[in-house]
Every structure is written in structure tokens, then in C-alpha cells.
Amino acid sequence: MTELKTILHVDDDDDILEIARMALEMVDSFTVHQFNNGSAALEKIESLAPDLLLLDIMMPGMTGPDLWEQIKGRPDCPEIPTIFMTAKAEDSLSQDLLNTGALAVITKPFDPMSLGSQIRAAWSLLEDA
């Protein structure tokens, strides 16, 4: 498994984007590319070649799971490990995402200081697989 360096983060909440960017770049030294909607992320994903997707579940227009399905269906994108973030602690939805291949589901509000370690812990599951 390659080292986790680059994260593509999509969330429709500008505050979440800013907090996550600061936490992941400043605290954990990741390279983070962010978009506030799925369409914009789809336009750029191939050129960014992220190691990991961090997707909000509930977004207007295109949900995180919808975006994930579109990315998985593209021949120009290899399978990219994906973590979802949600303000809704719906166990059934989270379990469905995990059952269909999501790496993890992180509940909002999240602790900015531990976000990177949560992501690294989920990433380490790939190495154990």
C-alpha cells in the first residue's frame, strides 16, 4: 500500500472545509484538495490523483455516496479508498457504506486535532487487508 499523502475532501459546508483543511494540512501534513460540490470534484479528480476521498454524505445536488459511485464507475480513476463524514449518526446508512466498501464513517462534529489520526487508523486497515 502506498503512503497516504493526498486527500480529496468534498463538503458543502465552508466552515467544515476550512477546519478540516487546517487540521489535515497543519497538524498532519497532508496535501488536501477541497471542493464544495461533487461536480467540481469530478472535473478535477483525474488530474489530482488523490490517495483518499473524504466525502460528506449529505450534500445538495450530488450526495457523497452518489459522487463515490460516479468516481468508481470512471475508467480513468483507479479504486480510491473512501471515508465518509456525516452529521447524521444513522447506523444503518453508515453500515451500508461500510458494507459496500467504504473505509470508515466519521461522525460530525469531529475533533480537528484527531481527524488525521482517525484517517490514518482507517488507512492502516488497508495495509492489514
Image (cartoon, rainbow, N blue to C red):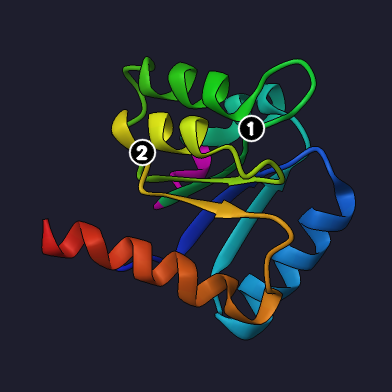
Q: What is the quadrant of residue 67 in the picture? A: top right
Q: Amino acid at mark 1?
A: Ala
Q: Which residues are magenta?
A: 47-51
Query: Residue at the location (74% across, 30% down)?
Result: 37
- Which of the marked residues, 1 or 2, is nearer the chain's N terminus? 1
Q: Describe residue 33's horizontal placement relative to residue 36 as left or right.
A: left
Write down the residue under mark 2: 98
Query: Residue at the location (36% across, 29% down)?
Result: 77
Q: Is residue 10 magenta?
A: no
* Place of residue 10 in the rendered image (x, y in percent of width and height, measured from the top left): 67, 41
Q: Give the position of the C terminus as an image quadrant.
A: bottom left
* Place of residue 12 in the rendered image (x, y in percent of width and height, measured from the top left): 80, 37
Q: Is residue 101 visible?
A: no
Query: Residue at the location (52% across, 55% down)?
Result: 7
Q: What is the quadrant of residue 4 in the picture? A: bottom left
Of the two numbered discs 1 and 2 in the rendering, the one whose residue sits closer to the viewer: 2
* Place of residue 124 in the rendered image (x, y in percent of width and height, measured from the top left): 27, 67
Most foreground residue, 67 or 95: 95
Q: Is residue 38 above or below residue 32?
A: above
Most foreground residue, 6 or 59: 59
Mark 2 Cα shell of 10 Å, populated few (<14), some (14-19), many (≥20): some
Q: Amino acid at mark 2?
A: Leu
Write down the residue under mark 1: 41
- Identify the element where label 2 is drawn: helix
- Identify the element where label 1 is drawn: helix
- Disc ID at residue 12: none
Q: Is residue 47 visible?
A: yes
Q: Describe residue 5's horizontal placement relative to residue 75 as left or right.
A: right
- Gap in Å between the C-alphas at discs 1 and 2? 22 Å
Q: Give the position of the N terminus as an image quadrant.
A: bottom left
* Place of residue 40 in the rendered image (x, y in percent of width and height, measured from the top left): 71, 28
Most foreground residue, 2 or 122: 122
